[in-house]
């Protein structure tokens, strides 16, 4: 092929590249390469699988030596809708399209393209598994359909136990019967595993599961099934936030369950996207209606209802007619002065647990901190062992006999000998789920006690065993972190207790009160089913805190919280971007931050604050400094485009510096 007749493929590489990259298409491969094809190319001495975005007879302004495409992957082409979604994500979240592609197609998925996936027949199981809706559910269902007919997303605010899932299933079945696909998003793997059994009873092998803990072969099966969907063959995909990258063909409905949950947000690496917000855009691209659901909708979503962007739909009746739980806030300072505390537990709480067990009912004890204790300290010299890579105390994990960093996984063997003064005087301080489990077993030796946190649930088998045994009543007391607050149904659970509840309020975050209220509501929803009224006991040193008052009284907090956000210029009334600078040299980082601060200060129409050292100012050997940017909702696109160019230019040439941009941080 002569130089004049050469064809070039402009490709997307799974790398953080600021420039377009083109490769020569060899004559023998030309018939196989089209826009959307995945091709093998060489870059910097390594081979990558890239995606062809454009084919042309010129290579743009690139003046260097251009290499050839070395091969073509036997995989279906990326569609224009997928490209549109990627390009929107790169623009909105201020990253490169290569970083989006890397998130969409991990190496494990790509390698599976060469292997044959086992096809399974598509069928929906017998009608008896399909629950009949109550009158309240039927009304909500019809209101959602009316919202869809107007092209408006629906926000279903339904108290825990009101039967939101049955409504989702009915909506999903309608679409699958039409041969279209449904995306059902949930925030946590544990929740997806419990829900999958329920969905499987209705949809059988039309159900696809997709999350990071699955094997590459399982994830590839979802990719393959969706690429081959259509022509009357629809699937329901139950997945976490990364499911928005799946290759949907005939997408007829998106369900976003627990839409308020911060687990939908990807924090690292880029793209730092919110799965909920990306699913909204995915719905627009595919012209698919979206229903969001929560017992405690986010203020952002409630703002969208107030402004007419969403239709608000209420479901305030529990499906089985159970009463709302009794709420008790215990003053731990007062109880301690009266001599009525037994270590971590008030005597009243111990009595309540005892009575619950005597009635043959179950208990959930909540503490949102895994490990035995969050730190150890020397009682002789005061030394606290810190991570050598992160500026944080090491957590004590008694069962493993280690001190562990929860940021970088650095660990050392635990001994009582202080590394500073060499005395055997190290003692644990504070409590985590492991310590609470130990102490509860001491107080109730005849009860069956289990723990449910990230430590235990790393094993899929162990996680499933605990949930099944607790649901079956074989576990009397479950000690858990926030993982257990989300969407689980346990019929025999009648008492929920929060230990050291104030830790959820002591956060340097304008969303702290909103999240605390959401958590309390979610936890209260776990207790009380059918004819049993539940109880939630909150042990607090701040019993008069406004969050507890609002929770006890059942007040409508939306108006007050939105007014407060507006007064202090916080989302959803403004847009926010968090810019984090990272460098292994503290002095060099400070100099870079000073330079960037001067530049940011000259940009019009933004409010810039910083640089600030975050609470944890060193992670994995890198020091951190943070800027916060605020700007009008109406000027977001132009400001982000200019800011992205500025930050790209600023980072260029500074090999030691990393600039991480987080749009809409949570």
Image (cartoon, grey):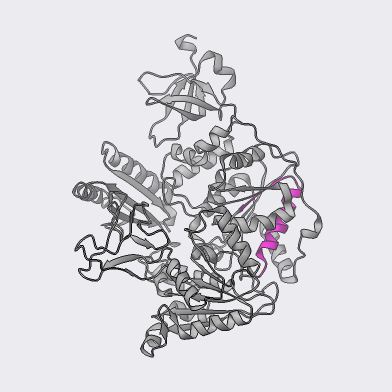
Measuring from the top left, give residue 393's x and y in whole percent: 31, 61
Q: Is residue 277 left or right of residue 343?
A: right
**Quarter of the image where the C terminus is located:** bottom left
Measuring from the top left, give residue 71's x and y in whole percent: 52, 21
Q: Based on the picture, tell me whether residue 319 belongs to the magenta stretch.
A: no
Magenta extent: 162-184
Determine if residue 369 is in view.
Answer: yes
**Quick one: 641 or 217, which is closer to the camera?**
217
Q: Based on the picture, tell me whether residue 164 belongs to the magenta stretch.
A: yes
Q: Is residue 120 left or right of residue 658?
A: right
Question: Which quadrant of the view contains residue 486?
Answer: bottom right
Measuring from the top left, give residue 529's x and y in whole percent: 66, 75
Question: Which quadrant of the view contains residue 386?
Answer: bottom left
**Quick one: 317 or 599, which is closer to the camera?**
317
Question: Which quadrant of the view contains residue 3?
Answer: top left
Looking at the image, is 346 positioned above or below residue 630? below
Measuring from the top left, give residue 362's x and y in whole percent: 60, 75
Determine if residue 312 is in view.
Answer: no
**Quick one: 26 or 444, which is closer to the camera?**
444
Looking at the image, is 245 positioned above or below residue 475? above
Q: Please, which residue is most extreme toward the bottom here?
A: 338
Q: Is residue 266 left or right of residue 470?
A: left
Q: Is residue 482 left or right of residue 469?
A: left
Q: How many marks?
A: 0
Looking at the image, is 221 positioned above or below residue 182? above
Tell me which residue sits at (53%, 51%) in the image. Answer: 241
For the stretch drawn in magenta, the main secondary structure is helix
Tell me which residue sits at (81%, 57%) in the image. Answer: 127
**Quick one: 408 or 113, which is closer to the camera?**
408
């Amino acid at each position: 092929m002569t130089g004049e007749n050469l064809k070039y493929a402009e490709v997307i590489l799974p790398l953080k590249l600021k420039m377009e990259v083109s490769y020569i298409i060899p004559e023998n491969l030309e018939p196989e390469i089209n826009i959307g094809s995945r091709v093998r190319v060489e870059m910097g001495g390594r081979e990558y699988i890239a995606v062809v975005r454009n084919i042309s007879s010129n290579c743009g302004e690139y003046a260097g030596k251009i290499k050839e495409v070395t091969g073509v992957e036997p995989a279906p082409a990326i569609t224009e809708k997928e490209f549109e979604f990627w390009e929107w994500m790169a623009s909105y979240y201020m990253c490169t399209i290569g970083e989006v592609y890397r998130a969409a197609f991990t190496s494990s998925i790509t390698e599976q393209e060469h292997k044959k996936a086992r096809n399974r027949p598509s069928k929906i199981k017998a009608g008896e598994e399909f629950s009949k809706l109550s009158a309240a559910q039927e009304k909500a269902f019809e209101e959602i359909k009316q919202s869809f007919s107007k092209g408006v997303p629906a926000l279903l605010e339904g108290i825990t136990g009101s039967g939101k899932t049955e409504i989702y299933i009915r909506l999903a079945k309608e679409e699958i019967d039409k041969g279209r696909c449904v995306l059902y998003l949930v925030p946590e793997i544990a929740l997806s595993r419990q829900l999958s059994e329920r969905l499987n009873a209705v949809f059988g092998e039309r159900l696809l599961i997709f999350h990071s803990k699955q094997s590459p072969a399982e994830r590839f099966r979802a990719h393959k099934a969706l690429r081959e969907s259509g022509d009357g063959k629809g699937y329901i995909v139950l997945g976490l936030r990364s499911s928005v990258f799946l290759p949907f063909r005939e997408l007829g409905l998106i369900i976003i369950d627990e839409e308020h949950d911060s687990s939908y947000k990807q924090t690292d690496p880029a793209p730092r996207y919110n799965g909920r917000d990306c699913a909204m855009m995915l719905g627009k691209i595919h012209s698919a209606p979206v229903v969001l659901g929560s017992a405690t909708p986010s203020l952002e979503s409630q703002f969208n209802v107030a402004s007419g962007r969403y239709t608000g739909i209420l479901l305030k009746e529990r499906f089985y007619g159970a009463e709302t739980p009794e709420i008790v806030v215990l003053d731990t300072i007062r109880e301690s002065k009266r001599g009525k505390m037994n270590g971590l537990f008030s005597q009243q709480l111990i009595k309540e647990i005892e009575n619950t067990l005597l009635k043959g009912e179950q208990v959930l004890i909540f503490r949102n901190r895994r490990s035995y204790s969050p730190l150890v300290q020397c009682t002789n010299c005061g030394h606290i062992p810190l991570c050598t890579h992160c500026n944080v105390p090491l957590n004590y994990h008694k069962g493993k006999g280690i001190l562990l960093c929860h940021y970088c996984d650095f660990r050392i063997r635990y001994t009582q000998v202080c590394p500073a003064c060499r005395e055997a005087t190290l003692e644990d301080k504070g409590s985590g789920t492991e310590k609470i489990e130990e102490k509860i077993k001491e107080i109730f030796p005849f009860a069956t006690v289990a723990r449910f946190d990230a430590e235990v649930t790393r094993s899929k088998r162990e996680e499933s065993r605990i949930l099944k045994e607790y649901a079956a009543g074989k576990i009397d007391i479950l000690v858990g972190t926030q993982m257990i607050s989300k969407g689980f149904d346990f019929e025999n659970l009648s008492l929920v207790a929060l230990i050291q509840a104030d830790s959820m309020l002591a956060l340097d975050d304008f969303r702290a009160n909103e999240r605390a209220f959401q958590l309390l509501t979610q936890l209260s929803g776990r207790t009380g089913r059918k004819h049993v009224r539940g109880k939630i006991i909150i042990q607090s040193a701040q019993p008069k805190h406004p969050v507890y008052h609002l929770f006890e009284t059942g007040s409508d907090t939306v108006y007050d919280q939105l007014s407060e956000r507006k007064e202090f210029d916080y989302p959803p009334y403004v847009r926010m971007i968090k810019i984090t600078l990272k460098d292994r040299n503290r002095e060099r980082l400070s100099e870079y931050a000073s330079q960037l601060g001067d530049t940011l200060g000259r940009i019009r129409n933004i409010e810039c604050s910083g640089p600030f050292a975050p609470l944890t100012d060193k992670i994995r050997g890198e020091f951190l400094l943070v800027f916060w940017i605020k700007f009008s909702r109406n000027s977001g696109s132009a400001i982000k485009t200019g800011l992205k160019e500025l930050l790209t230019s600023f980072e260029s040439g500074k090999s030691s510096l990393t600039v991480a941009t987080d749009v809409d941080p949570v």
